[in-house]
Image: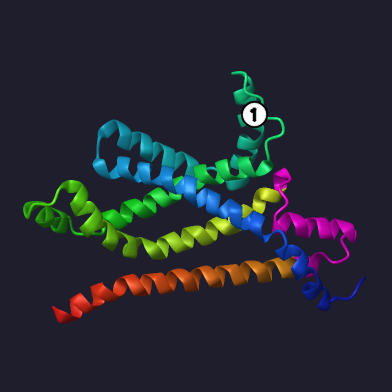
Amino acid sequence: MRPFHPLFILEIIPELVTYLPVTLGMVLGTVLFGGMWGFFLALAKVRRRPVTKALAEIYTYVTRCVPSVVMLFVVFYGLPELLLSVGINMNGVDNGFFVIVTFSILYAANISEVFRSAYLAIDKGQREAAVSVGLTEAQAFLRIVLPQSIVVAIPNFTNSLINLMKEGALAYTIGLIDIVGQGNRIIGRYQGSYTLEVYLALAALYWIMTIMIQKFFGAVEKKLSRGKKELTTAA
């Protein structure tokens, strides 16, 4: 049995980092499209119109019950067949497209709950007071409710983002070469001889990215909460 080779971890990290833009691109694309869809889902839930609220709740319930890897395979194999039936050929489409579609579907369900809970955490009396002094509903939302909701949402948003980044490691299962996909290619290159070292290198990269995300959004939350804390102290 081959002895553990810790220096190999340092040797392959630069090779893994080369594919970091693919991983980050997947995360950013999912946050953009999944976040927009999640916003509309949250809007449907808080506006309490029976039909749209029920549809949004059903969507959230169903998608949150499906494992990520199952949804990934359903989209990867099912979407091309579905579109081909209406004359759209998806041969040649980059696998990253299917990854972003899949995780946008799943991320929207989770982030809609983050948006919904953050909105409901703000006392509706503040919105009513703003409207009573002449602001429109849109102005009251943008100037009063939204800034406070963002502060409330940041911790849960951060957790969702970190979970998304980790779930994105499944992208290699459909052939997308991100840092995990590259790690598996390295393992294949050495015929499994450095499997432990490769996965430890990947774990280190994910650990560093997680810490950076937590630090960044922690600083954002602290800055946005400063005015609120000062107002509370003054009161």
- Residue interval drawn in magenta: 173-198
Outermost residue, right side:
1
Residue 33 in the image, given as x and y percentages of width and height: 48, 45
Which quadrant is the C terminus positioned in?
Answer: bottom left
Q: Is residue 222 left or right of residue 81?
A: left
Q: Is residue 209 left or right of residue 152?
A: right
Residue 152 in the image, given as x and y percentages of width and height: 32, 63
Residue 132 in the image, given as x and y percentages of width and height: 7, 53
What's the magenta bit mostly, secondary-structure-wise? helix
Q: Residues within 10 Å of mark 1 (few under 14, many from 20)?
A: some
Q: Nearer the viewer, residue 82 or 69?
A: 82
Q: Residue at x 73, y 62 (%)?
A: 18
Residue 195 in the image, given as x and y percentages of width and height: 81, 64
The answer to which image quadrant residue 92 occupies is top right
Q: Is residue 174 magenta?
A: yes
Type of the residue with mark 1 = Pro
Q: Nearer the viewer, residue 194 or 131?
A: 131
The answer to which image quadrant residue 193 occupies is bottom right
Q: Give the residue at mark 1.
A: 80
Q: Is residue 118 above or below residue 55?
A: below
Q: Residue at x 31, y 43 (%)?
A: 43
Q: Residue at x 62, y 18 (%)?
A: 87
Tell me, what colour scheme is on the image? Answer: rainbow
Which quadrant is the N terminus positioned in?
Answer: bottom right
Q: Is residue 155 left or right of residue 183?
A: left
